[in-house]
Image: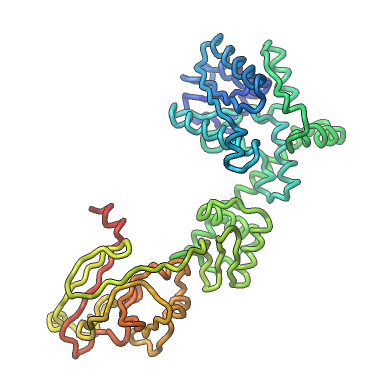
């Protein structure tokens, strides 16, 4: 078994030249096997620092304290640094209105991550082949996609799992051979948790059909993982190719094979909204992309493909700000952006150059500016007549046609006279405000995002 663990570590390049390890130790057979192995193989693995981390969840009263003392005692005997997190999981679960199993997992991994950062270390957990089988069955029962059927990854970020190809029977044999004591968590004997039901009722039946269940699942998981990794890489490439301002090109997404598109959708949901999508959610978003519609996917979070751009956004209220009067040359901060207004003489601009080449989108005829002209964000009933395009539209329709994301429309700065928009940030001047041969003074508008300006200062 010792050679099998070493081979697993080497096969997946788990240590990757890292010299420090934190072992997550509950006191059970799996984690004691892991701790003993890492301790005995320190020289072979070139480990400088090995730390044992234990979490007392305070769920099992005196039994939990017994486990804590057991692990502490082993560490003292073998001169292994010991780190303890003593936390009241039932209280936290009640306070945050979630299950104790979920709360315990979140707290544990937050603790492990903090130790990883503190010691610049990898964290080794004691998941074994049986755990992998249980995970696969659990995800299958919940209707997970291929990624869920890939089981527990041998290595992810700062977490490594050296025992992942050892069965629970092999773990217990290791403990017997090396005389390693361990404690038994009484909650593992009951069927109160889903995984225990799978462990006690489902897996024994499957082993009657296939006694080599664990090794068979290991091979299946490897094949499924290879397929998933390839499809995910293709999805990332497709997203990059479809990327646009504020989102992704719907036409390009529609051309993707469904296995690629579904993974692209999952990736966007995770990256933008932190949503872990299930099958129904992904199907709903794909439908929105195919049909060019918007769907509410979760708690006011929308997937929108109506304007030819696919994006995920929160359905917040319309962005509203006060207005700022145009008073000649000035520089001021407005709605988180630095606005610079400069006055130029038209004759100075025209001299020596073709006049038409000077009609830049951020130059307005200052002579039409009145006391009612202001800089602001959009409002209902706004209209816009873009320069030299021969039409007038409601501002809302114009921005939709220009494929501006719904959540971004309220952030654009405007110069307006009442409901008549004279200039739009990023789109330029209106027909009414364009510079002509009769213009005497020109207003030049420059917008600098305030956060960028501070970074560059």
Picture layout, residue 183 above or below residue 282 = above
Judging depth in this view, the residue of 451 and 64 nearest the camera is 64
Visual colour scheme: rainbow
Q: Quadrant of the N terminus?
A: top right
Where residue 383 appears, x then y in whole percent?
Answer: 39, 83
- Quarter of the rendering containing residue 25: top right
User: In the displayed structure, does residue 102 sit left or right of residue 45?
Assistant: right
Above or below: residue 82 compared with residue 139? above
Front-most of 292 and 343? 343
Looking at the image, the residue that sits furthest to the top is: 77
Q: Position of residue 152 (x, y in %)?
A: 65, 38
Which residue, as the protein is rendered here, is positioned at the far right? 208
In which quarter of the view is residue 159 placed? top right
Nearer-the-camera pick, 118 or 91: 91
Q: Nearer the viewer, residue 370 or 309?
A: 370
The mark total stands at 0
Q: Position of residue 124 (x, y in %)?
A: 57, 28
Asked where in the image residue 387 lies, by quadrant, the reply is bottom left
Residue at 40% across, 87% down: 392
| Horizontal side of residue 403 vs 266, given as left or right | left
Q: Is residue 433 left or right of residue 59?
A: left
Q: Is residue 160 above or below residue 425?
A: above
Could you tell whether 339 is left or right of 227 in the image? left
Does residue 17 appear anywhere in the picture? Answer: no
Q: Residue at the spot x=50%, y=17% of the render?
A: 81
Residue at image location 56% in from the left, 9% down from the top: 77
Residue 424 appears in the rendering: yes
């Amino acid at each position: 078994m010792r050679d099998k663990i070493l081979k697993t570590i080497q096969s997946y390049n788990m240590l990757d030249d890292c010299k420090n390890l934190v072992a997550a130790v509950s006191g059970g057979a799996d984690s004691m096997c892991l701790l003993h192995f890492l301790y005995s193989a320190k020289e072979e693995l070139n480990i400088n620092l090995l730390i044992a981390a234990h979490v007392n969840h305070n769920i099992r009263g005196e039994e939990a304290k017994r486990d804590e003392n057991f692990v502490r005692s082993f560490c003292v005997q073998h001169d292994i640094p010991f780190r303890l997190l003593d936390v009241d999981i039932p209280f936290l679960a009640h306070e945050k209105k979630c299950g104790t199993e979920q709360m315990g997992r979140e707290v544990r991994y937050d603790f492990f991550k903090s130790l990883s950062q503190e010691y610049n270390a990898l964290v080794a957990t004691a998941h074994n082949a049986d755990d992998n089988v249980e995970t696969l069955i659990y995800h299958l029962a919940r209707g997970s996609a291929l990624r869920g059927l890939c089981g527990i990854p041998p290595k992810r970020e700062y977490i490594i799992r050296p025992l992942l190809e050892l069965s629970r029977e092999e773990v217990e044999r290791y403990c017997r051979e090396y005389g390693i004591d361990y404690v038994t968590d009484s909650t593992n004997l009951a069927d109160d948790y889903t995984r225990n039901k799978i462990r006690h009722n489902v897996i024994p039946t499957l082993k009657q059909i296939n006694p080599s269940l664990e090794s068979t699942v290991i091979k299946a998981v490897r094949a499924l993982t290879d397929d998933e990794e390839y499809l995910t890489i293709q999805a990332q490439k497709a997203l990059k190719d479809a990327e646009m301002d504020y989102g992704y090109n719907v036409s390009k997404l529609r051309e993707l094979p469904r296995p690629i598109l579904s993974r692209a959708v999952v990736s966007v949901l995770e990256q933008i909204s932190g949503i872990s999508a299930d099958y129904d959610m992904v199907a709903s978003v794909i439908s929105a992309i195919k049909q060019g519609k918007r769907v509410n996917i979760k708690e006011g979070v929308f997937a929108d493909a109506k304007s030819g751009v696919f994006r995920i956004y929160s359905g917040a209220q319309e962005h509203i700000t006060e207005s700022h009067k145009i008073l000649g040359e000035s520089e001021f901060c407005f709605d988180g952006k630095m606005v610079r207004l400069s006055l130029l003489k038209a004759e100075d601009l025209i001299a020596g150059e073709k006049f038409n080449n000077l009609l830049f989108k951020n130059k307005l005829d200052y002579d039409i500016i009145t006391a009612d002209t202001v800089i602001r964000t959009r409002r209902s009933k706004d209209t816009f007549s873009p320069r030299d395009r021969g039409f007038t539209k409601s501002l809302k329709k114009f921005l939709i046609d220009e494929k501006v994301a719904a959540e971004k429309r309220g952030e654009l700065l405007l110069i307006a006279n009442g409901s008549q928009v004279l200039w739009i940030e990023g789109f330029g001047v209106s027909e009414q405000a364009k510079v002509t041969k009769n213009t005497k003074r020109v207003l030049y508008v420059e917008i600098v995002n305030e956060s960028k300006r501070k970074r560059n200062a």
